[in-house]
Image (cartoon, rainbow, N blue to C red):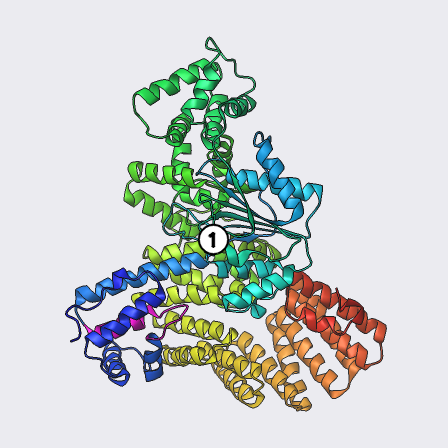
Amino acid sequence: MPFEDPPDPESAHTIDALIDRLRLLKIWAGNPSYEWIKDQINAAWQAAGLPAAERPGKTTIVDCFRSGRRRLNPELVIAVVQALHPDPGYVTRWRQSLRVIGGQREAATRVQVQDTLPQDLAGFTGRSAELDRLCRSGHHGGAVVIAGMAGVGKTQLAIHAGHVLHREQPFDQVLFVNLRGFHPDPAQPPADPSSVLEGFLRLLGVAGQQIPHDLRARIAAYRRRLAGTRALIVLDDAAATDQVDPLLPGSPGCAVLITSRRDLGDMRNATHLLVDLFTPGEAVAFLTGVVPLCPIGSDPDAPARIARRCGHLPIALGLVGAHIRGTPGWTLTDHADRLDERHHQRRLDTDVELALGVSYQQLAADQRRMLRLLSLHPGQDIDAYAAAALAGTGPPAAEAHLRHLHRDQLLQRATPTRYTLHDLVRTYAAGRASDEDPPPDRRTALTRLFDYYLHTAHAADRLLYPHRDPAALAPAAAHLEPPPLADVEAAMAWFTTEHAALLAVAGRAAAEGFDRHTAGLAWSLTNFLNLRGHWQEQITVQSHALAAARRLDDRREQAHIHRNLGRSLDMIGCYDDSRPHFRAALALFAEVGDQVGTATTHVNLARQYERQGRHPEALSHDRHALDLFRAAGNLAGEARALNNVGFQHAQLGEYPEALAHCRQALDLHRTIGNRHGEATAWDSIGYAHHRRGHQKAAIDCYRHALPLYREAGDRPNEAQALANLGDAHESAGHHADARAAWRSALDILDELGHADADLIRTRLPDSASA
């Protein structure tokens, strides 16, 4: 052996570094061939009962040792390690390293971006010199780094300056993101710039399918979108220059406000603004502005004493000011004396802890408990329904607690209905939770939270796709009150608002060993993530679910997850990576005798071949799916497959066969009451008539499809039907009607940020430069 001990996986902090250790382990083990490693793994997996479709080939093993990968298959890496050095203790160290690196990578990709500024702080005071400098710089464009210690008010200053700039001269576009550079929770590492760019590009109108995967390509696409515009970009809580550089627009008309606890002195061509503690005079002015009606008492120096005890730190002054407002009958002298007393007793060590302790002790017991439990939430913000689940109370009571905590400066308002914790408050609250709430109580609160997100997401998904077989969920551990979701629009709005929180919850559920919740959340999120084109997020969520389903030994669930992973990889063009998942799904569905699952997998394979223009292969899979749906007696699946078979015949120019199958699909959809399915059938029949040259019939069909798509809230397909209607009108010589239909389609696609918008734009010369 070239060295005595095997390499240490725990010294690796990135995927590439871990792969380097894997290469060294192969050398340490005598450098066996990849073929030998494959045979060892396949023998072990066969003994464990894994189907042949899940066993790796030699190429898959070779890929495990390749640098530059964005993700790893933890189970396969562990199998390689076990083949090379099957010591249980050593394998455990690899498992831990994979969990750490995988968790950091996944958490870094969970980013919440927005196209509006957070709410301005009512009654913002002080910082006049800094604000004046920020506004001058903002009007001229370029980047400003606002640096300073935690709690000094950097974020509020940047938000206030942004609102002032936007009022004085509105921007074409506003982008905001919390980069989590110094988040206190290790499960919330600094945001990955590539993921931030994906979010920004979506907000700028780029469809998910059109967003490049390479970081450089994303930077280029982002800068092209912002070229020639006046945009305001606020990058809050940056960790380092290399996190910020990819997010700079590179356009002279754009203003960038960056906040950080570091000075980021290596940022070239940026203005640097240090935000320090309040001066004594500013601190006193701030305090008296917060509590204008509180009498001073016997000591005229009381406001200055309070300011000194708060270290002249804005967050501490705000917290103490909220406490003062909540204690009528006390003077500022009384409050100053109390702070002096607590300081001399050494009950707290720092200014912020002193202020937090004063505010915390002032709260009622149930409000203190709510604050502690809020620190357990893995997302960036929370509403009253999720807070109620955490606390085991009703939403009205939770909302009252949230408002009280906001009034006392312990919560910040992210939107009119959502709240967030300042990092320092989160750290304090988490410490109090650790000290005051036993681990079983904290786990019970998390269970209620995970139950809430799982059952609400499942209900929302049922509205999106009512003909999908529901998941078999265990009852919630406690009574929950979900938000009212009456229709498709409400379900989509809930998913959109809770998108980042749901991903964070799915990751925390997997990390905490909530396997049923992990699998159920993946099932419930599938359709929303598909509709929005969040394929990488889908892959992450489904990968967690696959590991959970294997621990549960749930073969049917594994099959569904393999199918979803195959479809997601397929949608980002990774056909070679998707097919093993499809093969595994087919093998597992056959094992458990699930004809419907097998049929749906064939539908997915048909769509893969269709995207590649391989219509005969697509038709073969759609026919196989049709036979299986019929054998299973699944009418919804049969109707869907009939329509797919008809559409493939139309693609092949076989119009009589196309019309026959699509009309059968239409009749069956009507029989089972699937109005969305009726829309797809009318659309396909119209397409066949249009391709056949029967434009009047095509126009009638599209007009049947449109109201049904609108009723279902299916905007993308509504736009496609409008575009098809325009094409049919144009072929019939109805040029004005064609342009009207295309314009309506373009309006929807622009609103959705859909990639097909540019294609429709080419049909409208007057919109080509829009």
Nearest to the observer: residue 319 or residue 346 = 346
Residue 142 lies, with reference to residue 679, above or below; the image says: above
- Percent coordinates x, y for residue 439 in the rendering: 28, 44
Residue type at mark 1: give it. Thr
- Percent coordinates x, y for residue 126 in the rendering: 57, 29
Left-right relation of 347 to 420: left
- Percent coordinates x, y for residue 599 in the rendering: 48, 80
Left-right relation of 231 to 466: right
Nearest to the observer: residue 479 or residue 672 = 479
Which range is magenta?
A: 65-85
Nearest to the observer: residue 747 or residue 128 = 128
- Percent coordinates x, y for residue 246 in the rendering: 52, 59
Residue 130 lies, with reference to residue 522, above or below; the image says: above
What residue would you read off at disc 1? Answer: 241
Quadrant of the snapshot with the N terminus: bottom left
Residue 9 lies, with reference to residue 626, above or below; the image says: above
Left-right relation of 167 to 572: right
